[in-house]
Amino acid sequence: MRNSLASALLLIALSATAGAAGLDLFPRPNEIFPLLIADPRHTQLSASYYRYSGQNTSDIALGGSWGLTRWRTGLLQDWLWELDLEGMAYSRFQIGGGINEFETVDFIANIPITVRRGDISFKGTLFHESSHLGDDYIRQTGTDGFRSSNEGVRVQAAIEPRRYLRLYGGSTYLLHDIPIRGPWSAQAGLEFFSDDLGWSSRARTRLFFAQDFQSHQDVQWNVDSHTVAGLKLNFHESPTRAVRFQLGYFDGHSPFGQFYSQRAHYVDVSIAFEL
């Protein structure tokens, strides 16, 4: 079953390109299916600060998306397709005292196919993820953690019924996982945006609120919640380039693979760049 899901996603991509028209190389990424603002593991470049277990803590995401090709199919000219590559290193540090102690890092590689028609968009992703403990954490605790690696398929859909509102949902299935865990997870969320505040002639400035819910079979479907609100600046010369200043609240299981079974809740402040 797991291999058949990956094969089905590949066949969708091949059938879509078979009648491709208007093929564009290296388009701007995240135009067809914009990144999910409140998903902590969505590919981005960001830094956050919060207090966790009595310690000053920072999460650093070093990621980017690369558009490979975009096309319209011969049979469905009103459907716009795109093939991308995504990669990210997502890490956590304890900060302060002159030395930032490296705790953990997750490496994420994605091959997403996105498609849009009007206000409806879809994203199907083949992905690989691995999680590793940092040297400082190993020295402090004496534990080497465990081998954590998985590959899977993620399918997401979004609708924008109003210019200020976006709703989305999706599901993930692990094709291969070490250690073996429940393969299924579900996701849903929403995003609200204000009108342009008119603060800058070079960028569109908007207030936003976003809520992401995720539920994983390997932790008995307990819901993880991440809420963020802040200010987003989209630069006019490149609409997909943006910077966000936001305040967030996380309550659920840790988004890091080595600590997936641990509960965490904290308030964070962060800055994120959409390149």
Image (cartoon, helix red, strand yellow):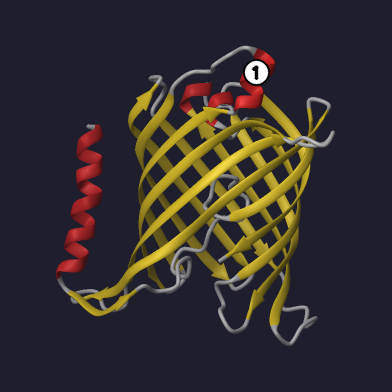
Q: Nearest the camera: 161 or 255? A: 255
Look at mark 1 in the image and give the residue it sits on.
139
Q: In which quarter of the image is the N terminus?
A: top left
Amino acid carrying label 1: it is Arg
Task: Please state the horizontal and vertical placement of residue 57, each as a whole percent of the image.
Answer: 76, 36
Q: Can residue 216 be seen in this view?
A: yes
Q: Is mark 1 on a helix, strand or loop?
A: helix
Displayed quadrant of residue 190: bottom right
Furthest-left residue in this view = 18
At 69% from the left and 35% from the top, the residue drawn is 93
Q: In which quarter of the image is the C terminus?
A: bottom right
Left or right for 13, reference 190: left
Q: In the figure, 107 relative to 125: above or below?
A: above
Q: In the figure, 202 relative to 122: above or below?
A: below
Left or right for 52, reference 35: right
Q: Is residue 81 visible?
A: no
Q: In the figure, 148 relative to 18: above or below?
A: above
Furthest-front residue in this view = 98
At 41% from the left and 31% from the top, the residue drawn is 184
Q: Nearest the camera: 241 or 171? A: 241
Task: Please state the horizontal and vertical placement of residue 160, each as a whole percent of the image.
Answer: 53, 66
Q: Nearest the camera: 130 or 125? A: 130
At 45% from the left and 46% from the top, the residue drawn is 170
Left or right for 241, reference 80: right
Q: Around disc 1, counting alpha carbons within 10 Å, would you say few (fewer than 14), some (14 to 19), or many (20 or more)? A: few
Furthest-top residue in this view = 142
Task: Please state the horizontal and vertical placement of residue 8, each as a whole percent of the image.
Answer: 21, 47
